[in-house]
Amino acid sequence: MVDLWTLAAFVPAALIMNMTPGADMLFCMGQGLRSGPKAAVMASAGIAAGGMVQVTLAGLGLGALVAAHPWAFDVIRWIGVGYLIYLAWQVLRQRDNSHTQAKGLGIWRAFGTGFIVNLTNPKIILFVLAFIPQFVVPDAGSVLGQFLVFGAVLGLGGFVINGVMGIFAARISNRTGRYSRPFAWVSAGIFAGLAARLAILERT
């Protein structure tokens, strides 16, 4: 379905994209600081799963619909802003309620949170529409199938790299089973910063 030479050209380009610091990496680092390495890895898995949904939508042509209708883009974007602000507030509320007993996210909630954060960032689907078609060969078979293959490569690379960065952040936090006030502020700051970034996001 995908020519091996085309795939060989796509992999290094995808890795460069994966290694570029961005919202997904910061989010996984925030989860690592807040909830530990396992939650960071699951958050990365959730982001990768959300990315595959976005790739599928782009392959089906729905991304063009989002690009053509600013109101749809903005609705999704502001849902994402609200959710990230809610996460920041949750972190600070836990810290205020109990400095020593508050807990981070469980692994499945971390997965779901990463999934939702990815889906509520409409810029992802526009990126997919700008990047992946450069490697799609219409005569090589199903366009959707090629989108899915390339999306899987992007998702796998992102899962590994973002997960590693989240684990690194968890190690830095030196968690000992207690919720650290400084790292609560750092984690909440990351979520708030991502919300601000998404709020000022433009379609182009």
Image (cartoon, rainbow, N blue to C red):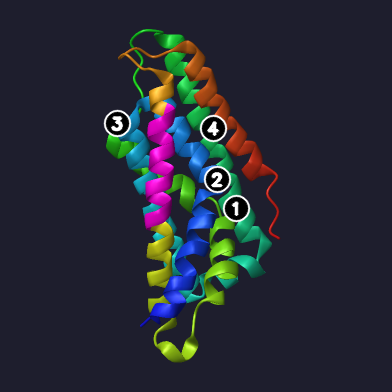
- Could you tell me which secondary element the residue under label 2 belongs to? helix
The residue labelled by disc 2 is 79
Q: Which mark is residue 106?
A: 3
Q: Is residue 113 visible?
A: no
Nearest to the observer: residue 140 or residue 107: 140
Q: Are marks 2 and 4 in contact (CB under 8 Å)?
A: no
Question: Does 87 sit left or right of 68 as displayed?
Answer: left
Q: CA distance from mark 2 to mark 3?
A: 23 Å
Dividing the picture into quadrants, the one containing residue 103 is: top left
Identity of the residue drawn at 54% across and 62% down: 125
Q: Amino acid at mark 1?
A: Val
Identify which residue is drawn at 57% across, 26% down. 189
Query: Residue 98: x, y in percent?
Result: 39, 8
Q: What residue type is disc 2 on?
A: Ile
Tell which circle, 2 or 3, labels the residue nearer the N-terminal end.
2
Q: Is residue 196 magenta?
A: no
- Disc 4 from disc 3: Cα separation: 17 Å
Residue 108 lies in quadrant: top left
Dot 1 or dot 4, earlier in sequence: 1
- Say which residue appears at 44% left-offset and 29% top-offset: 169
Q: Is disc 1 in contact with disc 2, using a CB cutoff of under 8 Å?
A: yes
Q: Amino acid at mark 4?
A: Phe
The mark lying in front, picked from 2 and 4, is 4
Q: Which residues are magenta?
A: 156-169
Read off the residue under disc 1: 75
**Residue 27 drawn above or below residue 138:** above
Q: Secondary structure at mark 4?
A: helix
Task: Kindly identify which residue carries mark 4.
Answer: 191
Rendered location of residue 199, percent (x, y): 66, 43
